[in-house]
Image: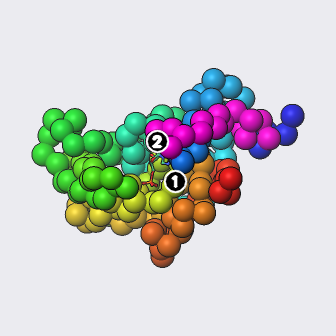
Amino acid sequence: MDKQVLLDKSIRRVPDFPKPGILFYDISGILMVPEAFSYCIEKMCELVKKSGANTLAGIETRGLIFSAVIAERLGMPLMLVRKKGKLPGKTYSCSYALEYGTAEIEIHVADVKPGQKVLLVDDLIATGGTLKAARSLMEMGGAQVTGYLGAVGLPFLKYDEALAPLPVMTVINYDAE
Ligand code: AMP
């Protein structure tokens, strides 16, 4: 089977999760099909190489699954972008709006520095709100963000506009259903 088709088939669609009207693309299906996971990582590695980045930053939780494997394969440092209260050291912190309420993410101050060219990695890019907040964390530490990478993209949610002018790269995209 074509690898791109295999990847598509491995992603479960869960209607009305976590709330009515949302079609949830469940990447845990990718992890259950080793050939699909391996293909996805290979494609993401190719995109990282094109990005000009020298450092990765992965978004908790699912973004870390992908970014950790890529970082190890390419021999790149990986910063953890975590939910508030999880990192033990001194942190930069950024709140951002969700559909209902707000969320807050953090990064260790010691991890981020001028000279880093950072590619931000998440499992799935929807509105781009999380990655935009992660970008501001990098900039607090003087690092430069080169772009964004996701395994899955939902471009109909207009993440390109939210994340402009930096490039957004994905392995597989879905239209509104
Ligand atoms: P956003 O900030 O809107 O780009 O949302 C990105 C985060 O929310 C990612 O870490 C995804 O894991 C998760 N997410 C948002 N929408 C979906 C969806 N329809 N299916 C699966 N995950 C989603």
- Against 44, residue 3 (above or below) is above
- Could you tell me which residue is drawn at 56 percent across and 30 percent down? 28
**Residue position marked by numbered label 2 in the rendering:** 19
Q: Mark 1 or mark 2: which is in front?
A: 2
Specify the label residue 125 is tagged with: 1
Q: Residue furthest bottom?
A: 165
Label 1 beta carbon within 8 A of ligand 1: yes
Image check: 113 left or right of 163?
A: left
Task: Judge left or right: residue 7 versus residue 166.
Answer: right
* Residue 118 visible in rendering: no
Q: Position of residue 62 (x, y in %)?
A: 46, 37
Please tell me whether mark 2 sits on a helix, a strand or a loop.
Answer: loop
Q: Nearer the viewer, residue 151 or 25?
A: 25
Query: Would you say 52 lies left or right of 6 here?
Result: left
- Within the magenta stretch, is there residue 27? no
Three-letter amino acid code of the residue under disc 1: Ile
Q: Quadrant of residue 11?
A: top right
Q: Which residues are magenta?
A: 5-20
From this viewpoint, which residue is outermost toward the right? Answer: 1
| Residue in the picture at 47% in, 60% down | 127
- Residue 78, how many percent across, how many down? 39, 43
Say whether residue 142 is left or right of residue 175: left
